[in-house]
Image: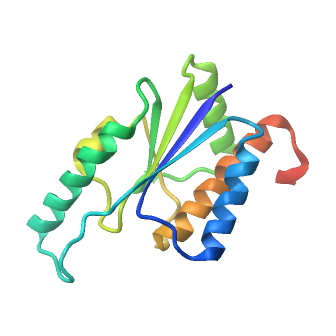
Amino acid sequence: MFDITLIAMGKLKEPFYLSAAGEYAKRLGGYCRFHLVELPEVRLPDTPSPAEITAGLDKEAQMILTKIPKGAWLCIFTPEGRLLSSEAFAQKLAEVKTSGKSSACFLIGSSFGIASQVKAKADFKLSMGPMTFPHHLARIMVLEQLYRAEAIQAGSKYHK
């Protein structure tokens, strides 16, 4: 069975986000071994300088890089990534599975983004579109799209 890991910066606290995340994680379990890794965001001042932001992202990168499963295909969510439809995303994930990889890892960075050294390791960069979303909502959207991609691959009626 294929392994999917989602690394997310920050913790969900609100019950409605926890409930939605739990539901999609449970649904994903029918298609893959799903793992969620929550990492703490580095705390920065209210108005951080560019140097403080870079230093914070570098500290987060150190944590992130230790949590990416060895040999996993790495996809990061970033505004400069590619836009894909749900069907194209499902196809991309199917290609990863048939490429010989036994796992995929997806990363949602912190509110200041993702360090350049992590972006350099990415096999694929994916955008959620030009709009800005709160990180907690983005996590639910990613979980739903992962589930939808698996359902599309399985020919499920969920996607219809």
Question: Based on the displayed image, in which of its 4 quarters is residue 29 positioned?
Answer: top right
Q: Tell which of 76 and 46 is nearer to you.
A: 46
Q: Is residue 79 left or right of residue 20?
A: left
Q: Is residue 133 above or below residue 2?
A: below
Please tell me whether residue 12 is drawn above or below residue 118 in the rendered image: below
Write the residue at 41% across / 63% down: 10
As drawn, which residue projects farthest toward the bottom?
Answer: 46
Q: Let me know if residue 41 appears in the view.
A: yes
Question: In the image, what residue occupies the spot 67% across and 51% down?
Answer: 25
Q: Position of residue 108 (x, y in %)?
A: 44, 55
Q: Quadrant of residue 52?
A: bottom left
Query: Which residue: 62% across, 75% down?
Result: 15
Q: Position of residue 61 (x, y in %)?
A: 26, 48
Q: Residue at x 71, y 45 (%)?
A: 28
Question: Which quadrant of the figure has residue 141?
Answer: bottom right
The quadrant in which the C terminus is found is: bottom right
